[in-house]
Image (cartoon, rainbow, N blue to C red):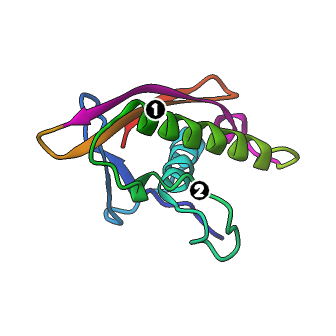
């Protein structure tokens, strides 16, 4: 029997930053499973998955020094295209309602000068009505 394991952890409910860990093992389902899937797809660059070469938003590979209007528009476009890709891929697939993406909302995109990076906060809404928020 195969299990889905939690590898993405939210550090706290306050800053909602994520980290990756394989320990301790925790079986997941529902919105936790969907959240991991969405984060993986947000960070996956196109042409890096042998089986799904066009899949992924590639947010981690965007060389961004300044969060201009153009860069914000690119981030929004990538996220919206990924939302559409995930929803389309779930058509005619037998998934529980809490693992099926209904909406991926962008809450904020901000520049963090101290760390030299950008922060994107997103909200996942499932067909079961469950909601989670995370920050990349």
Total numbered labels: 2
Residue 16 visible in image? yes
Q: Nearer the viewer, residue 58 or 127?
A: 58
Question: Could you tell me which residue is drawn at 62 percent across and 36 percent down?
Answer: 80
The residue at which mark 1 appears reads as 122
**How far across and how far down the image is residue 110, in percent?**
30, 30
**How far across and how far down the image is residue 46, in percent?**
59, 63
Callout in the foreground (1, 2): 2
- Above or below for 108 versus 79: above
Local packing at callout 2 (Cα closer than 10 Å; few below 14, some 14-19, many 20+) is many
Apparent side of residue 66 relative to residue 78 in the rendered image (left or right): left
- Above or below for 5 versus 104: below
| 101 in magenta | yes
Q: Quadrant of residue 63?
A: bottom left
What distance separates the C-alpha of mark 1 from that of mark 2?
16 Å
Question: Could you tell me which residue is drawn at 36 percent across and 43 percent down?
Answer: 136
Q: Tag on residue 24?
A: none
**How far across and how far down the image is residue 123, in percent?**
49, 29
The residue at which mark 2 appears reads as 56
- Above or below for 98 versus 57: above
For the residue labelled by badge 1, is the local secondary structure a helix, a strand or a loop? strand
Q: Which residues are magenta?
A: 94-112
Apparent side of residue 115 relative to residue 66 in the rendered image (left or right): left
Local packing at callout 1 (Cα closer than 10 Å; few below 14, some 14-19, many 20+) is some
Whichever of callouts 1 and 2 sits on the residue coming sooner in the sequence is: 2
Q: Nearer the viewer, residue 118 or 13?
A: 118
Cβ atoms at labels 1 and 2 below 8 Å apart: no
Q: Quadrant of the N terminus?
A: bottom right
Question: Could you tell me which residue is drawn at 20 percent across and 37 percent down?
Answer: 112
The secondary structure making up most of the magenta span is strand
């Amino acid at each position: 029997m195969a299990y889905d394991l939690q590898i993405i952890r939210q550090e706290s409910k306050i800053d909602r930053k994520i980290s990756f860990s394989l320990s301790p093992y925790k079986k997941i389902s529902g919105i936790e499973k969907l959240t991991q899937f969405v984060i993986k797809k947000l960070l996956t660059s196109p042409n890096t998955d042998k089986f799904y070469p066009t899949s992924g938003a590639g947010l981690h590979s965007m060389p961004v020094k300044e969060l201009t209007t153009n860069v914000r528009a690119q981030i929004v476009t990538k996220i919206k295209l990924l939302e559409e890709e995930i929803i389309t891929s779930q058509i005619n697939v037998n998934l529980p309602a809490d693992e099926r993406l209904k909406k991926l909302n962008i809450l904020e995109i901000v520049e963090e000068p101290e760390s030299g990076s950008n922060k994107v906060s997103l909200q996942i809404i499932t067909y079961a009505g469950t909601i989670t928020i995370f920050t990349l």
